[in-house]
Image: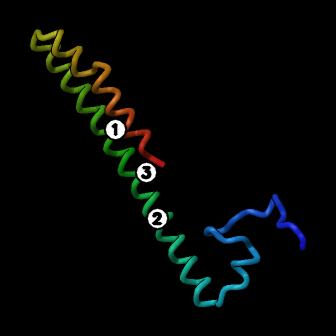
Amino acid sequence: MPKAKDTEQAFLGLTPTQFLALSDTKALALMHAQSAIKWQQAVHALAGLVLGTITYLASLVVCFHLAKLGFPKLAAMALGTPVLTVIKRILDSRI
């Protein structure tokens, strides 16, 4: 019994041999499902990038505004470690 090649890569969770054994309808349905998954991942990544950028810019504006009004401790908190950690996690949630 021959062993499967170690270099054989899985495509849609299937090996190339298994994928070729599928009917055309099932193969096409799997391709559409994979396309939909990739689209959702791209939208999620873009949303994370936009939300992280908006959050960072908003915290910068708040920091400058509070500093201008004479609240340096509150301004420092607006760009403190907890706020920047949340922003970093939003940006890291991108795929």
Instruction: Give the Cα separation between the discs numbered 2 and 3.
Output: 10 Å
Q: Which amino acid does the dot numbered 3 rest on?
A: Ala
**Quarter occupied by residue 70:** top left
The kind of secondary structure element at disc 1 is: helix
View extreme (left): residue: 69
Q: Earlier in the sequence, mark 2 or mark 1?
A: 2
The kind of secondary structure element at disc 3 is: helix
| Few, some or many residues within 10 Å of mark 2 (<14, 14–19, 20+) | few
Q: Which residue is mark 2?
A: 39
> Where residue 78 sits: x, y (%)?
22, 22
Classify 2 as above or below 48: below
> Where residue 79 sits: x, y (%)?
27, 21
The kind of secondary structure element at disc 2 is: helix
Q: Residue at x 33, y 33 (%)?
A: 87
Q: Which amino acid does the dot numbered 1 rest on?
A: Thr
Left or right, residue 8 beside residue 67:
right
Left or right, residue 24 beside residue 46:
right
Instruction: Give the Cα separation between the discs numbered 2 and 1.
Output: 21 Å
| Few, some or many residues within 10 Å of mark 1 (<14, 14–19, 20+) | some
Q: Earlier in the sequence, mark 3 or mark 1?
A: 3
Left or right, residue 72 beside residue 49:
left
Q: Which residue is mark 1?
A: 53
Quarter of the image with the N terminus in it = bottom right
Q: Nearer the viewer's eye, disc 2 or disc 1?
A: 2
Q: Which residue is mark 3?
A: 45
Q: How many marks?
A: 3
Pick the front one: 89 or 46: 89
Classify 64 as above or below 16: above
Pick the front one: 58 or 19: 19
Q: Residue at x 54, y 70 (%)?
A: 34
View extreme (right): residue: 2
